[in-house]
Amino acid sequence: MVARNFRSKRGELDVVLIHGTVLVVCEVKARANNAFGFAAEAVTPAKQLKVRRATFDFVEHLRAHDAALYARIRSTRFDVATITGVQLEVLPNAF
């Protein structure tokens, strides 16, 4: 794990990991149950845009403060992790 709850003026990143040369940004959504919709449905196009913009800010932060980690990054992947009750599901490459 590289970062948790990274905040910039353009958004927040829940979890950021590095997997080899891939920067993995994971948006986490939790619900007690599906009575009001599935957790993944909360990651709307507008939310995706905020996450992408915050990711840009995070990469710029790395460039300035952790050049070694910055140099490892070759691509970025956006995952969504949903928690419904006690059930965890990870949707890789969600957007």
Image (cartoon, rainbow, N blue to C red):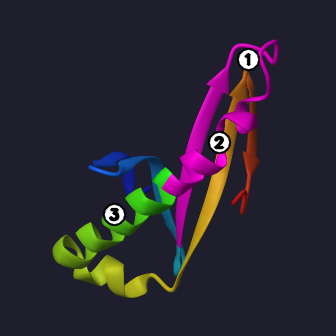
The residue tagged 2 is 43
Observer-nearest of 70 and 9: 9
Q: Give me the C-alpha separation between circle 2 and circle 3.
A: 19 Å
For label 1, the SS is loop
Secondary element under disc 2, as helix, strand or loop, is loop
Mark 1 neighbour class, 10 Å CA radius: few under 14, some 14 to 19, many 20 or more: few
Of labels 1 and 2, earlier in sequence is 2
Find disc 3 in the rendering and name its residue. 58
What are the residue bounds of the magenta stretch?
Answer: 23-49
The residue depicted at 62 percent of the width and 33 percent of the height is: 29
Q: Could you tell which of marks 2 and 3 lies nearer the N-terminus?
A: 2
Of marks 1 and 2, the one in the foreground: 2
Foreground tag (2 vs 3): 2
Q: Quadrant of residue 64?
A: bottom left
Residue type, label 3: Phe
Q: Assign the N terminus to one quadrant of the image.
A: bottom left
Q: Amino acid at mark 1?
A: Gly
User: Pointer 1 and pointer 2: residues touching (CB < 8 Å)?
Assistant: no
Crowd class of label 2 (few under 14; some 14 to 19; many from 20; radius 10 Å): some
- Taking the spot 72% from the left edge, 30% from the top edge, the residue there is 39
Instruction: State the residue lying farthest toward the front.
Output: 46
Q: Residue at x 25, y 78 (%)?
A: 63
Q: CA distance from mark 3 to mark 1?
A: 31 Å
Q: Mark 1 sits on what residue?
A: 85
Above or below: residue 88 compared with residue 57:
above
Q: Quadrant location of the C terminus?
A: bottom right
